[in-house]
Amino acid sequence: MLKSIIPVVCSESIKEGPMEHEHIHWLGHASFRIEDAGKQIYIDPWKVADSMPRADVILITHAHFDHYSPQDIEKLRQEGTVVLAPYDVAKSIKGARAVEPSQVYDVNGTRVFTIPAYNLGKKFHPKENKWVGYVVALSSGQRIYHAGDTDAIPEMRKVECDIAFLPSGGTYTMTASEAAAAANTFGPKAVIPMHWGDIVGSKEDAEEFGRRFKGETIVKVPERR
């Protein structure tokens, strides 16, 4: 099913050259804010500053505390905010929509595709939990992939995106070298390394990723306010 849905994320091509990423805000760890034509899309908000804009869409990848933070969700929610999360998380959030891997969802006009996210040979993120990453199709045609907490799984090879957020800190997810090898396989135009600098991983991991990845690596500074 993945093979059939991912290539149709968008039909508008992105121009060649360095990827535009000013609309992408890394909030630290695996937390991101994406601006899209006036919409505020958050993925795994954690330790979010009080000054952050309220959310139109919140995407949660899985149940671990550094990805699912009820306090941060409530801080960002406003009337009309749509929250998507795997079933074990969604059942704890009033009004949330439960998602499963390898599906497509329309979120107030934004197409969101769910990608499996799990460990290979580690116990932290079992496949049977049905946790996810997301491909978000922006109004510009740009496709953004947040991999969630995952190893270099076979399903990742079928993802088509312009920018990928890949965990690179090791221990619970891919190491920098494993993440770069995975990215070289499915070929995003640019990667923002994540899941470093808090709990596990360091800037050196992000830089190591950049040395090994054949595309553009964007190492961002976390926005804490």
Image (tube, rainbow, N blue to C red):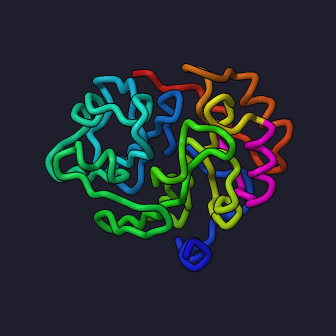
Magenta highlight on residue 195:
no
The quadrant of the rendering that contains the N terminus is bottom right
Residue 145 percent location from the top left of the image: 56, 54
Q: Nearer the viewer, residue 4 or 219?
A: 4
Q: Nearer the viewer, residue 189 or 15?
A: 189
Residue 100 percent location from the top left of the image: 41, 61
Q: Is residue 160 above or below residue 78?
A: below
**Residue name at image x 22 percent, y 44 percent:** 93
**Residue name at image x 33 percent, y 47 percent:** 88
- Looking at the image, can residue 146 be seen? no
Q: Is residue 217 left or right of 71 when viewed as pictured?
A: right
- Looking at the image, can residue 76 be seen? yes
Q: Is residue 106 above or below residue 98?
A: below
Quarter occupied by residue 49: top left
- The boundaries of the magenta stretch are 177-192
Residue 59 percent location from the top left of the image: 38, 49
**View extreme (left): residue:** 79
**Residue name at image x 71 percent, y 62 percent:** 157
Task: Please give the count of numbered marks on the rendered protein.
Answer: 0
**Residue name at image x 75 percent, y 22 percent:** 204
Residue 10 percent location from the top left of the image: 53, 73
